[in-house]
Image: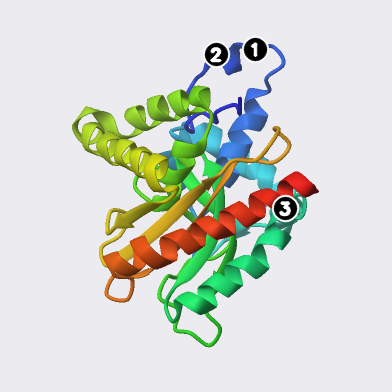
Amino acid sequence: MRKRTPLSGETTPTENDRQFVTALSRGLDVLRCFRPKDRTGLSNRDLAERTGLPNSTISRLTYTLLQTGYLLYDEPTGRYRIGVPALSLGFACLGSMPIRDAAKEHMQRLADYAGDGVQVALGARDEHTVTYLACARAENGMMSLQLGVGSRISLARSAMGRAYVAGCKPEERAEILELLADHYGPDRWPTILDGIESASAQISETGFYVNYGGWHDGVHSVAVPFPMPGDATPDMAINLGGPAHFLTKERMENDLGPRLLDVAQSLRLHVTQV
């Protein structure tokens, strides 16, 4: 079972473990707050809001991360940005996943076949989101989705996220549903749960799940779960998405969905042979 990551600022039984270093965990929570779209950086107030930690705690954490180079500080704006040492950790993570290299050729071939504005991506879970680990777009095609490696999308509403939930082990699925129920609250959760269960039913029947605008208006996407053996590499999911007018229902269900499933099956064969 893959251990769930607690929501930022949340107290869990893990923090009562004498071996658990709470200060380190909270420092990592601060680094996890930064997203590719945060081009102007984040202030201490922004970080406090995203983590749920007190301002005084955030100030000590950002000071420490600044001194170690993991954060950079812009005095005119009073905002922090991620430093180069944090980037090296990301590349070390990607380099430890040889499946990415094996997937790139398959993903690029499918993206070229699908055409302009379509993107194929491989991702893994990060809290209540999915992070892109690899992406492919049609060569010389128009870029419709402004997403790349490191981008995070919804675990609960996106095709990739729902496919991941459908493909993970039962014990992790139970943990994920509990986490998402807390995150979305009683008013929104029943509708979101219906979408997750519908995705699981589709995958059981066809092997893939098609999402028509559920994650973002005007975007259709299809995804396939891609569980990995053992615990050294995270479970993943692979998706294909693009403009709704280009990715019609017939094309998604009768052409691109089966092709994406073929890609996932080819990669599973590669993993078993390595």
Quarter-of-image position of residue 24: top right
Q: Earlier in the sequence, mark 3 or mark 1?
A: 1
Looking at the rendered structure, the secondary structure element under dot 1 is loop
In the displayed orientation, state which residue is furthest to the right.
274
Amino acid type, mark 3: His
Whole-angstrom CA distance, mark 3 to mark 1, is 39 Å
Q: Confirm whether residue 21 shows in the render.
A: yes
- Residue contact at pointers 2 and 1, CB within 8 angstroms: yes
Q: Position of residue 268 (x, y in %)?
A: 65, 49
Looking at the rendered structure, the secondary structure element under dot 3 is helix
Query: On residue 17, which mark appears?
Result: 1
Amino acid type, mark 1: Asp
Task: Relative to 53, say whether 154 is above or below.
Answer: below
Residue placed at 65% from the left, 12% from the top?
Answer: 17
Looking at the rendered structure, the secondary structure element under dot 2 is helix
Query: On residue 270, which mark appears?
Result: 3
Along the line of sight, the residue nearer the viewer: 55 or 2: 2
Q: Position of residue 196 (x, y in %)?
A: 33, 39
Q: Residues within 10 Å of mark 3 (few under 14, many from 20)?
A: few
In the displayed orientation, state which residue is furthest to the bottom.
140
Q: Confirm whether residue 150 shows in the render.
A: no
Residue under label 2? 13
Amino acid type, mark 2: Pro
